[in-house]
Image (cartoon, rainbow, N blue to C red):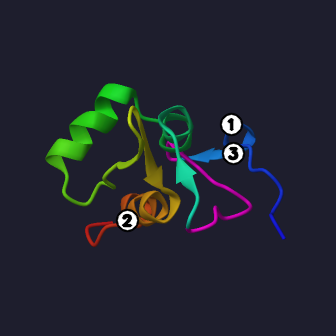
Amino acid sequence: APSAPIKPSSAPAVGGFLILETPLPAEYLIRLPELIRLIGLSKASIYRLEKADAAFPHRVRIGQRAVAWRASDVARWVETRSAPSAAD
């Protein structure tokens, strides 16, 4: 059975990242406007990270002129960014 739609824009933010009460399905694809809301970065910052940070999720082509990011990849990246570092 499909789960209820997730509204990331209404989720609370912690450290610049949105905290979702309901995890996104692993096969869920996130389009750019939703990715911007979820991780709190601009389009330019996302594109820069794609090129500079090997750990940042890579986009998936879903059509001739459409791309998206896998929710599981984005969630994994957010977890690594929000985890306390050894220096803390």
SS for dot 1? helix
Disc 3 residue type?
A: Pro
The C terminus lies in quadrant: bottom left
Apparent side of residue 67 relative to residue 14 in the rendered image (left or right): left
Q: How far apart are the alpha carbons under marks 2 and 1?
A: 22 Å
- In magenta, the rendered stretch is 15-26
Q: How far apart are the alpha carbons under marks 3 and 1?
A: 8 Å
Disc 2 residue type?
A: Thr
SS for dot 3? loop
Percent coordinates x, y for residue 30 in the rendering: 53, 47
Apparent side of residue 5 relative to residue 13 in the rendered image (left or right): right
* Mark nearer the N terminus (2 vs 1): 1
Which residue in the rendered view is the most extreme toward the left? 52
Q: Magenta span has 19?
A: yes
Which residue in the rendered view is the most extreme toward the front? 64
Residue on which disc 2 sits: 80
* Mark nearer the viewer, 3 or 1: 1
Disc 1 residue type?
A: Ser
Disc marking residue 68 = none
Residue at the (67%, 56%) spot, across then down: 20
Residue on which disc 3 sits: 12
Q: How far apart are the alpha carbons under marks 2 and 3?
A: 19 Å
Percent coordinates x, y for residue 69 in the rendering: 43, 50
Apparent side of residue 86 relative to residue 16 in the rendered image (left or right): left
Q: Nearer the viewer, residue 80 or 5?
A: 5
Report which quarter residue 4 is drawn in.
bottom right
Q: Nearer the viewer, residue 51 or 81?
A: 51
Vertical arrangement, residue 66 with respect to residue 68, above or below: above
Residue at the (53%, 31%) spot, across then down: 33
SS for dot 2? helix
